[in-house]
Amino acid sequence: MTYKGTFPYPPMFEVLADELAEVRSMLSANVYKEGTEKFRGSREHEISKLGILGELIARDYLSLRPINFKCAKLIDIKPVVEPDIILTDVAKFSNIDVKCVKLGGKYFNVNYDAFNNENKKVDVYWFVRLERNYEASHYLYTDVEVKRDFKVVDLTYTKAYSMDAPTL
């Protein structure tokens, strides 16, 4: 695990994430509907908002540094199987999946099926943990560390690799 620090993010990201999550949820309603393995129940909007917020914060972090990168779309007609961020000038550990942990969240989780999907090439999991006063702490885990150090657990709707979130 690599801890990258705690940094502020623009408060308007929360409003933007909320608005984009509404559109994302509408566009992918047939993917996450009841009866499918991807069903998120009443938490669909909250989960989408959190994911978008994490990606916005990660993009902001990278854009303030001399790092070249490209990103998957925040909103698309259907969910895509690709990394959220690809570092374009890095040969190793360049395919990143961003996970956002809500304020007070106690666990870092990676969806079991997504982790084991051979079509999704991810070698780094970037956990953006929301803190008070529009700040977020940043933690990076390689795919090897997730497989080795996280436990497999059953969550409400899915199975996941999980570990206790570090405390600051």
Image: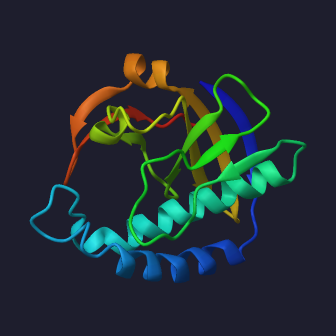
Indicate the quadrant containing the N terminus: top left, top right, bottom left or bottom right: top right
- Percent from the top left, x then y, of residue 40? 25, 64
Residue drawn where x is 39% and y is 40% of the image: 110
Position of the C terminus, as image quadrant, is top right
Q: Can you give x and y, in whole percent of width and height, for residue 77 in the image? A: 42, 72
Give the side of residue 78 with respect to residue 40, left or right: right
Q: Residue at x 42, y 45 (%)?
A: 106
Q: Does residue 112 sit above or below 13 in this rendering? A: above
- Left or right: 29 in relation to 82: left
Q: Nearer the viewer, residue 149 or 96?
A: 96
Residue depicted at 9% across the width and 65% down the height: 35
Residue 17 is left or right of residue 144, and the answer is right
Image position, residue 103 (x, y; %): 52, 58
Residue 105 location, x and y as percent? 45, 51
Hey, which quadrant is residue 17 in on the image? bottom right
Location of residue 105 with respect to 140 vertically, above or below: below
